[in-house]
Amino acid sequence: MKKIIIAFGLLVSSLGYSQQEIKLDIADALVIRSLEFSYESYLSDESSFGVSALFNLAKQDVNFRYNENMMITPYYRHYFTSDYKWNFFGEGFLGINSGKKESIKDSGVYDVKYTDGALGIAVGTKYVAEGGLMIDVYGGVGRNLFGSDSPVIVPRVGLNVGWRF
């Protein structure tokens, strides 16, 4: 019990002293009808951790959509420059995703549900205005590791607009 209290105290204190951001991926919302919300907390000027939640709102039969119906993505970012306004970063992520994949068996087409975990990397850049408005653009790719019914490649692409506080 003592270890749990200490771990919880460290987590709360680390969040209390760091800069934080909340963001919405507007490219996903406008182009492919999905919502992706993100939260990011800075560990130092050079690194941060965060989590994204993607919810696909597009129907299964549209021409262009993510395969994933839902994806939770914890990530770690390392910032390579120290400029407050413009910053270039590299990211490592673990995407837990679920969705449907089309499968052909016995002369029929079936939708097979899957849940899998992807490990991947991404790169991007971030702009932060003095008032707290932030915009980041990133792109990367991950590979699903566990399931045989899931797609092999998982994209990680975004244009986020948010607020730093």
Image (cartoon, rainbow, N blue to C red):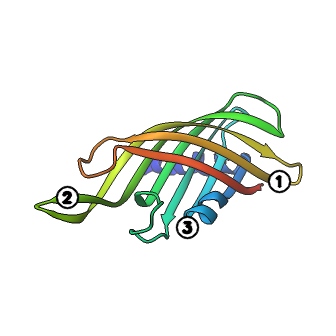
Pointer 3 or 1: first along the chain: 3
Q: Mark 2 packing: few (<14 Cα in 10 Å), some, or many (20+)?
A: few
Instruction: Name the residue rendered at 47%, 60% in the picture.
Output: 65
State which quadrant residue 32 falls in. Answer: bottom right
* 2 vs 3, front mark: 2
Contact (Cβ within 8 Å) of mark 1 with mark 2: no
Instruction: Name the residue rendered at 13%, 62% in the picture.
Output: 107
Q: Amino acid at mark 2?
A: Ile
* 3 vs 1, front mark: 3
Percent across and percent down for residue 43 are 66, 39
Q: How far apart in space, not on screen, are marks 1 and 2 (Cα)?
A: 50 Å
Contact (Cβ within 8 Å) of mark 3 with mark 1: no
* 1 vs 2, front mark: 2
Percent across and percent down for residue 141 are 48, 40
Pointer 1 or 2: first along the chain: 2
Which quarter of the rendering shows the C terminus?
bottom right
Would residue 35 be found to the left or right of residue 150 on screen?
right
Q: How far apart in space, not on screen, are marks 2 and 3 (Cα)?
A: 27 Å
Residue at the farthest left position: 106
Q: Amino acid at mark 3?
A: Arg
Q: Name the residue beneath numbered marker 3.
A: 33
Q: Mark 1 packing: few (<14 Cα in 10 Å), some, or many (20+)?
A: few
Residue 132: image tag: 1
Mark 2 lies on a secondary structure that is strand
Pointer 2 or 3: first along the chain: 3
Q: Mark 3 packing: few (<14 Cα in 10 Å), some, or many (20+)?
A: some
Q: How far apart in space, not on screen, are marks 3 and 1 (Cα)?
A: 27 Å
Q: Amino acid at mark 1?
A: Gly
Q: Name the residue beneath numbered marker 2.
A: 104
Mark 3 lies on a secondary structure that is loop
* Position of 41 relative to 31 (above/below): above
Count of numbered circles in the view? 3
